[in-house]
Image: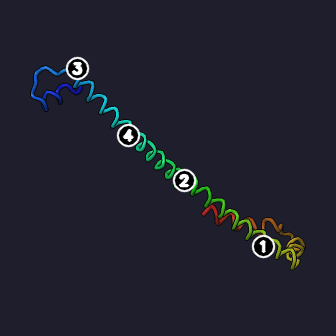
Amino acid sequence: EVKPLIQMFTGDEEVSPMYTMMINMKIRGLLNQTIPPAKATLYAMGMAKLFVLEIGPLITALLLSGRIGGSYAGEVATMQSTAQNKLLLTLGVSPVAWTFVPSLYASLL
């Protein structure tokens, strides 16, 4: 309600409808100029928060799993090329259990 504000500034008891209409138009114009940039700013802040809180850990997990997977692939390839897998099978130990179980226990800690 803008009538009390108009009364305060003009000092008149009766406020003309023309004053009210002009002030309403001015306020609407100001809001139409102010609100869209504010919405855009809020949207940008939301997207930044999304990237930091959601996509950041996802990319980190993907990179970390790729690095760990490459490490396991290298270890298995080295064991295969030096015939360690055949040795483990001769000793009665599963090569999968030999390479994977210690890492599983370490991840549980």
Q: Earlier in the sequence, mark 4 or mark 1?
A: 4
Residue 36, position in %: x, y? 43, 40
User: How much space separates mark 4 and mark 1, taking CA atoms?
Assistant: 60 Å
Q: Which residue is mark 3?
A: 17
Eyeballing the image, is 45 above or below 35? below
User: How much space separates mark 4 and mark 2, taking CA atoms?
Assistant: 29 Å
Between tags 2 and 3, which lies in front?
3
Give the amino acid type for the residue marked by disc 4 in the picture. Answer: Gln
Between tags 2 and 1, which lies in front?
2
User: How much space separates mark 3 and mark 4, taking CA atoms?
Assistant: 24 Å
Residue at 34% x, 32% y: name it. 28
Give the amino acid type for the residue marked by disc 1 in the picture. Answer: Gly
Q: Which residue is mark 1?
A: 74
Residue 59, position in %: x, y? 62, 58
Between tags 3 and 1, which lies in front?
3
SS of the residue at dot 4?
helix
SS of the residue at dot 2?
helix
Residue at 66% x, 63% y: name it. 63
In front: 61, or 47? 47
Q: Which residue is mark 4?
A: 33
Q: Which residue is mark 2?
A: 51
User: How much space separates mark 2 and mark 3, taking CA atoms?
Assistant: 50 Å
- Left/right placement of residue 31 relative to residue 54 reads left
Q: Earlier in the sequence, mark 4 or mark 2?
A: 4
SS of the residue at dot 3?
helix
Q: Tell me, yes or no, whether the two marked residues, 2 and 1, touch with CB atoms within 8 Å.
A: no
